[in-house]
Image (cartoon, rainbow, N blue to C red):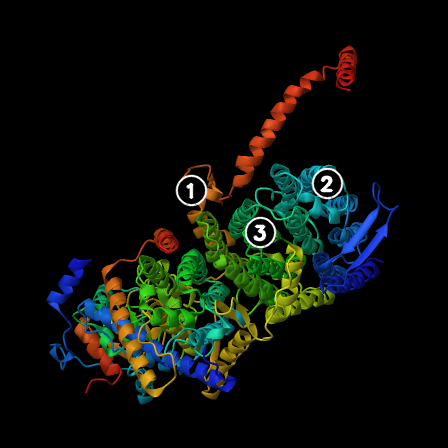
């Protein structure tokens, strides 16, 4: 127990400030849906609860999303938090090309989320099926099942890109 | 004993309930922020819980088709029990307005009332997660009861009363009463009970996403919108009240006995200082220990029971 | 005809209850009919204690009879037994001499035996009646021997003569009488380990009879203990009270622990009755100990707490049993695992059962909380006794009572939650019908009773204290006129039920109004339960009653000694393809394993030996007769 505390006191705060993210200007956020209005940004600007949904992804995006909660990227400082139940969520962060088996589950998750809500598709698979595009087993992108408000491209998108995308969607980055 | 008229009592009670209601989310946010700092993260703002609650109030509520009127009643019952409990605990003055209405037993059973309804709400939606959360929550609450009663008994033996206001007053007036090994043991026992009842590590992880490791969170998976906001807020108030109770019963100095301007200011500063210290202690503990396996929790509660038993024994034998 | 009898019983109950009320308030009455009962005739006296219990009998009969109008649906069977049962229960508190008491006691037992056998095609009911008959007569034997010993030593059959004569008896004699009579009465009250008949008999009887048995009959056992220890034998040594407190703690814990894992709804309520009898006995025992150490005010307080709990338990246990009866009626089963979703199909019954569950879990602002609070306060006062061994006993009782309180909450969350909430687990539960108007009226009556008992402790405690004082032979305590708050020992503790109820009501209304004003929630949408996007949501995916109790089964496994029985039916071709699996996790009753099984085994072994004298030869029997004659001649 004391070793952990001593380590913390020695290392200090390890969080990188957003301005240090190297990939910042080169990554355009694709504004896909009409719903990402200023109103939603006003409601969720300071507090966003995300439910991550794996719609048949290879888990590459999940690993990157997992890095968001750690000390280096620390998404919680922006008021963004991951929650377990879609009933608690404002935003569905969907990865994967939406396999046939996960289509209905994704739709039910979306229905279970209370309004107002946004859907962000992460990764190239979420955008249009990525490298699985055209396969018999996938529907080709999250937009085939639920209305998508924003897409964060990349295969996989780095945690910095994910944060940049999330902050853009919330209108918190100038 | 001060005699206060009925209207003054009502106003005092409302004021104290309002204060607790407004301050509670800040305490939760503070603990979260401290835990983040202790793990090397910049962490969220201590004011974040307010933003979360306000946002939830503006969302729609999605209710399960399986659920009944009990599901919608439960958040109101939780808030009501916390508000009434807030008028009984000595927060700012040693004798809050409604302290005559009941002592520590009333407080514990008010919390149980909230747990009862929350457990029923967990069963109401017919999901396995909710049932599991309910089962675990009532088991932990049941096993924590004997410790509370024995700790109360130890206090009552020392101060001659179970009325919370009077205990705080007597201990505050005679610091020598508190300089006793039984007092410290009762404090430790009560601290462990606080961890169990408010769902903190090592009993329950408030930030977990794995349903199989949830106790409190599992019961509220079905709640959304303003109902979720009320439940989160009631949980924050429960933590605030437990911590205040712990502080004001076992470290009862600098609590004003009269409602005067300067006294209130001093009282608020003292309370804030003590709460911050306890919040730091809680954050350090939560960062340092891992969550106990569920079926090891009764062992922890048995340990706290043994501490309470020792405390009573030491009070009786060292009289 | 059945309906008219039940209406008559209800009216009779009302009259008897009013009569008891006047007696409780101090209006003493007497009735003597010399020829009605052998030996010394029928003799009835009403003192405050007798009046209190008479009130209990009458007041509980009213809702039971009203309920029976709809429940029995004109069935003739058991009407006579029911009438006899209530009559006998009304006579027991008033009996003033030994023959009257024992006659009424035995009639009460026989009538309830007949009522337990109402459904005599059910083998479980027949077995239950048999166990009940054996246990109640074993208790009767203890009572008979105790009372006859007292009669022989004091020279009088009348109870009123015993207190004065008891002072002349030696210490061992008084202890013997106390032990015999306490055993007999404790058996009737359902104290562990004499409780084995309760969980069998109460579920088998019709629900309104179970309500009377749980609410009133077992309390008459407590009344007997009170009379024996405090009135008939004078002031006893502290160990009487200690034994009662320990027995009470054991019953409270055992009762609630078995209730927490029980799957049969009415058996669960029966075990819960054992739990509450334990709580009452803890308070009674505390009163005994305070009385024998000379702390009369505290003794009065402890006994008043016991009386309050007797009243409260009658109210909410009767409510729960009537509700359970309605559920069994509607869903056609007593098994919790077969119920579910009844809150939408039987809304009034569920609301009534919820009130009963809240009351029995001792949650504010209902009546269970008041008597539990009073009992705790009585126990907390033990600091005044300067003897550490007695302090230790009180501490054990405190811890046990606290654990019982928590476990009772868990038990009734489970009972109400599994039975009434979520989806129905069987077709029968899905098609359940709401109870009839008379059944609902009876339950509503008891809900009102619970609410009244909750809000009026300041009005009820003075007369209860006076009754206790009268029993102890002291002057009634003076009460401060404060309608809102009960105060214990000045500043030790205060409780104000009306204020709590009002504050809770305000706390419920305030957020509701605020939400309305803020137009929150902006919309309410109904959707399926969150089940991780799974395609199917059936009742098979709900938590079961057995699963809900599994934390307790684990923690208290030394008590339950659960056995795990798994039957796997595999496909003929390969044992790896399982066709069907049955999992059972039954608990065993420790008392039956450790106490009754060896005892009965020893009795059987002994009688097998003794059977050797029954050789079948007439000559041998003639020799037996001759030998017995010779022995008697020598002795005479």
- How far apart are labels 3 and 2 at the CA level? 23 Å
Foreground pick, B300 / C155: C155
Tag 3 near tag 1, CB within 8 Å:
no
Q: Position of residue C331 (x, y in %)?
A: 64, 58
Precedes in sequence: disc 2 or disc 1: 2
Tag 2 near tag 1, CB within 8 Å:
no
Q: Position of residue C621 (x, y in %)?
A: 77, 14
Packing grade of label 1 (10 A; few <14, some 14-19, many >=20) is few
Q: Look at the image and tell me in which quarter the C terminus of chain B lies.
A: bottom left
Q: Residue at x 59, y 66 (%)?
A: C367
Residue sticking out furthest to the front: C168
Q: Position of residue C223 (x, y in %)?
A: 67, 52
Mark in front: 2 vs 1 = 2
For disc 2, the marked residue is C154
Is residue B19 toward the left or the right of residue C571 in the image?
left
Foreground pick, C275 / A138: C275
Which label is found at residue C537?
Answer: none
Q: Quadrant of residue B304?
A: bottom left
Q: Secondary structure at mark 3?
A: helix
- The image shows residue C586, relative to residue A45, as above or below, that is above
Q: Look at the image and tell me in which quarter the N terminus of chain B lies.
A: bottom left
- The image shows residue C391, relative to residue B45, as above or below, that is above
The chain carrying label 1 is: C
The answer as to whether the residues below labels 3 and 1 share one chain is yes
- The image shows residue B312, relative to residue B77, as above or below, that is above
Q: Secondary structure at mark 2?
A: helix
Q: Secondary structure at mark 1?
A: loop
Which label is found at residue C288?
Answer: 3
Foreground pick, C285 / B106: C285
For disc 1, the marked residue is C577
Foreground pick, C461 / B149: C461
The chain carrying label 3 is: C
């Amino acid at each position: 127990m004391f070793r952990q505390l001593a380590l913390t006191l020695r290392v200090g705060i390890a969080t990188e400030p957003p301005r240090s993210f190297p990939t910042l200007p080169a990554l355009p956020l694709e504004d896909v849906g009409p719903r990402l209005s200023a109103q939603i940004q006003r409601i969720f600007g300071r507090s966003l609860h995300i439910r991550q949904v794996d719609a048949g992804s290879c888990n590459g995006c999940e690993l990157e999303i997992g890095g968001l909660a750690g000390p280096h990227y620390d998404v919680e400082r922006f008021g963004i938090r991951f929650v377990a139940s879609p009933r608690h969520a404002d935003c569905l962060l969907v990865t994967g090309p939406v396999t046939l088996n996960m289509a209905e589950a994704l739709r039910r998750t979306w229905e279970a989320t209370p309004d107002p809500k946004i859907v962000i598709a992460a990764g190239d698979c979420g955008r249009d099926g990525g490298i699985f595009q055209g396969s018999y087993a996938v529907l080709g992108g999250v937009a085939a099942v639920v209305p998508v408000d924003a897409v964060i491209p990349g295969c996989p998108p780095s945690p910095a890109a994910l944060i940049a995308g999330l902050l853009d969607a919330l209108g918190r980055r100038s | 004993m001060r005699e206060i008229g009925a209207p003054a009592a009502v106003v005092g009670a409302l004021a104290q309930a309002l204060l607790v209601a407004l301050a509670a989310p800040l305490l939760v946010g503070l603990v979260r922020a401290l835990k983040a700092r202790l793990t090397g993260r910049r962490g969220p703002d201590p004011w974040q819980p307010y933003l979360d609650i306000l946002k939830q109030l503006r969302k729609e509520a999605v209710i399960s088709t399986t659920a009944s009127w009990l599901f919608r009643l439960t958040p109101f019952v939780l808030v009501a029990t916390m508000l009434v409990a807030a008028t009984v605990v000595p927060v700012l003055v040693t004798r809050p307005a409604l302290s005559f209405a009941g002592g520590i037993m009333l407080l514990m059973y008010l919390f149980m009332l909230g747990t009862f309804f929350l457990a029923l709400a967990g069963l109401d939606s017919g999901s396995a997660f909710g049932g599991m959360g309910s089962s675990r929550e009532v088991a932990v609450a049941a096993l924590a009861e004997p410790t509370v009663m024995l700790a109360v008994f130890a206090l009552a033996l020392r101060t001659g009363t179970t009325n919370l206001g009077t205990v705080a007053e007597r201990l505050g007036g005679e610091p020598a009463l508190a300089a006793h090994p039984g007092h410290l043991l009762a404090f430790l026992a009560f601290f462990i009970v606080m961890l169990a009842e408010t769902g903190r590590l090592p009993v329950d992880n408030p930030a977990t996403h794995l349903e199989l490791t949830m106790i409190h969170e599992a019961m509220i998976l079905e709640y959304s919108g303003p109902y979720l906001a009320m439940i989160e807020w009631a949980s924050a108030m429960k933590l605030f009240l437990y911590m205040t109770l712990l502080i004001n019963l076992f470290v009862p100095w600098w609590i004003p006995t009269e409602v005067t301007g300067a006294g209130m200011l001093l009282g608020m500063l003292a309370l804030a200082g003590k709460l911050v210290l306890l919040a730091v202690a809680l954050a350090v503990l939560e960062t340092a220990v891992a969550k106990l396996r569920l079926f090891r929790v009764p062992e922890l509660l048995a340990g706290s029971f043994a501490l309470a038993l020792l405390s009573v024994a030491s009070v009786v034998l060292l009289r | 005809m059945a309906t008219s009898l039940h209406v008559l019983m209800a009216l009779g109950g009302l009259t008897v209850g009013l009569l008891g009320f006047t007696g409780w308030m101090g209006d003493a009455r007497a009735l003597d009919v010399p020829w009605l009962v052998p030996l010394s005739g029928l003799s009835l006296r009403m003192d405050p204690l007798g009046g209190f219990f008479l009130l209990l009998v009458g007041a509980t009969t009213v809702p039971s009879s009203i309920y029976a109008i709809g429940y029995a649906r004109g069935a003739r069977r058991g009407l006579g037994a029911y009438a006899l049962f209530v009559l006998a229960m009304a006579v027991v508190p008033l009996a003033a001499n030994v023959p009257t008491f024992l006659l009424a006691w035995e009639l009460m037992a026989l009538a309830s035996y007949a009522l337990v056998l109402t459904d005599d095609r059910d083998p479980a009911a027949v077995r239950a009646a048999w166990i009940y008959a054996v246990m109640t007569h074993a208790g009767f034997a203890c009572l008979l021997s105790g009372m006859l010993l007292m009669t022989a030593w004091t020279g009088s059959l009348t109870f009123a003569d015993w207190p004065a004569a008891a002072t002349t008896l030696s210490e061992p004699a008084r202890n013997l009488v106390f032990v015999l009579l306490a055993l007999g009465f404790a058996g009737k009250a359902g104290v562990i380990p004499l409780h084995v008949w309760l969980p069998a008999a109460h579920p088998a009887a019709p629900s309104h009879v179970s309500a009377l048995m749980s609410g009133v009959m077992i309390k008459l056992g407590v009344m007997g203990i009170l009379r024996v220890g405090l009135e008939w034998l004078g002031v006893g040594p502290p160990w009487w009270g200690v034994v009662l407190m320990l027995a009470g703690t054991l019953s409270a814990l055992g009762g609630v622990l078995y209730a927490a894992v029980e799957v049969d709804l009415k058996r669960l309520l029966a075990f819960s009755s054992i739990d509450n009898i334990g709580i009452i006995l803890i308070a009674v025992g505390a009163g005994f100990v305070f009385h024998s150490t000379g702390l009369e005010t505290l003794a009065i307080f402890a006994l008043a707490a016991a009386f309050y709990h007797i009243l409260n338990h009658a109210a909410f246990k009767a409510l729960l049993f009537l509700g359970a009866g309605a559920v069994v009626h509607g869903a056609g089963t007593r098994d919790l695992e077969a119920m579910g979703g009844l809150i939408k199909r039987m809304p009034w019954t569920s609301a009534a059962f919820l009130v009963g569950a809240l009351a029995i879990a001792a949650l504010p602002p209902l009546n269970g909380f008041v008597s539990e609070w009073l009992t705790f306060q009585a126990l907390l006062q033990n600091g005044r006794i300067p003897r550490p061994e007695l302090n230790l006993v009180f501490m054990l009782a405190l811890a046990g009572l606290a654990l019982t309180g928590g476990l009772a909450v868990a038990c009734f969350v489970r009972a109400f939650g599994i039975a009434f909430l979520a989806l129905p687990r069987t077709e029968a539960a899905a098609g359940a019908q709401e109870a009839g108007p008379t059944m609902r009226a009876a339950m509503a009556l008891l809900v009102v009773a619970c609410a009244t008992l909750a809000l009026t402790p300041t009005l009820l405690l003075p007369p209860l204290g006076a009754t206790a004082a009268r029993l102890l032979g002291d002057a009634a305590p003076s009460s401060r006129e404060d309608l809102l708050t009960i105060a214990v020992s000045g500043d030790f503790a205060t409780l104000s039920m009306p204020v709590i109820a009002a504050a809770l009501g305000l706390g419920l209304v305030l957020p509701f109004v605020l939400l309305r004003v803020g137009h929150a929630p902006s919309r309410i949408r109904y959707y399926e339960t969150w089940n991780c996007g799974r395609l199917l949501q059936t009742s098979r995916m709900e938590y079961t009653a057995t699963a809900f109790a599994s934390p307790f089964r684990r923690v208290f496994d030394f008590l339950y000694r659960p056995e795990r029985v798994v039957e796997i039916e595999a496909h003929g071709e390969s044992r790896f393809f399982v066709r069907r699996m049955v999992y059972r996790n039954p608990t065993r009753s420790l008392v039956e394993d450790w106490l009754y099984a060896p005892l009965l085994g020893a009795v059987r072994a002994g009688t097998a030996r003794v059977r050797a004298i029954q050789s079948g030869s007439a000559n041998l029997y003639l020799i037996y007769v001759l030998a017995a004659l010779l022995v008697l001649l020598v002795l005479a």
